[in-house]
Image (cartoon, rainbow, N blue to C red):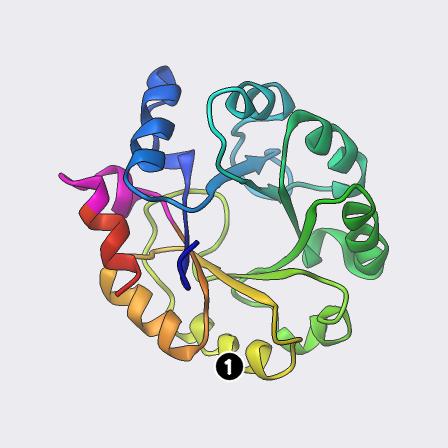
Amino acid sequence: MSEIIVSPSILSADFANLERDIKAVENAGADWIHVDVMDGHFVPNITIGVPVVKSIRKITKLPLDVHLMIENPEKYVEPFVKAGADIITFHYEAAGEKSREILKMIKSFGVKAGISIKPKTSPDEIFNLLTTADMVLVMTVEPGFGGQSFMADCAEKIPYLKNNSPQNMIIQVDGGINAETAKVCTRLGANSLVAGSYVYKSDDIKTAIDSLRG
């Protein structure tokens, strides 16, 4: 695996040809597959759930990086683990004081546990969780829809998280990531990038993925 983990988001894939589009990024050198799960409550959009993750598991060997943008994430940890998730990330804003307990629950199943913060949430709020989480996901757009513009001020959270986390922490960024914004994030200390539109709408998926690594 490369120093920068590239996790293309299937939110921008063609759902009628999901196997084809997942194989395309796998063959082009993606490290993980990013799966956005939205419930229409925590975010104003509905995407996919456990059955789709279970189906995806059968067609790729890449780690499934499942991002729960849902209320009551603790109810869905075990079903997503059983469906084949390798990394489960949930939102601090959806879990609040239950966040540490949920991180521990995810890790108890032998998968990586991530915590995500929305653009308006200060990284100070998750300071006490940084020794429990395996990954922190910094949203650089408001979660809910793909294709939004990168919010540069959100990337300024990255150095704080890097400086206050264990050395092996994965700092992932999601939202408006392309070759230029990837450079901004990796210079600040991010080591995992989620990109949907930039990868799937490019003429050459391999070139797009390679460009994210600089």
Q: Quadrant of residue 211?
A: bottom left
Seen in the image, is 15 located left or right of residue 210?
Answer: right
The C terminus - image quarter = bottom left
Residue at image position (34%, 30%) is 13
Q: Against 113, is 50 above or below?
A: above
Q: Quadrant of residue 151?
A: bottom left
Residue at the limit of the structure toward the left, as seen here: 203
> Looking at the picture, how far across and down is residue 153, in whole percent?
42, 75
Seen in the image, is 35 located left or right of residue 11?
Answer: right
> Looking at the picture, how far across and down is residue 154, in whole percent?
46, 71
**Front residue (pair 19, 197):** 19
Residue at image position (27%, 44%) is 199
Seen in the image, is 52 located left or right of residue 134?
Answer: left
Q: Quadrant of residue 39?
A: top right
> Looking at the picture, how far across and down is residue 67, in whole percent?
58, 44
Q: Is residue 197 magenta?
A: yes
The magenta stretch is: 195-206
Q: Is residue 208 magenta?
A: no
Q: Which residue is mark 1?
A: 159
Residue at image position (67%, 60%) is 134
Number of on-image labels: 1
The three-letter code of the residue at mark 1 reads Pro
Q: Against 47, is 1 above or below?
A: below
Q: Crowding at label 1, few (<14), some or many (≥20) Cα neighbours within 10 Å?
A: some
Seen in the image, is 133 located left or right of residue 209?
Answer: right
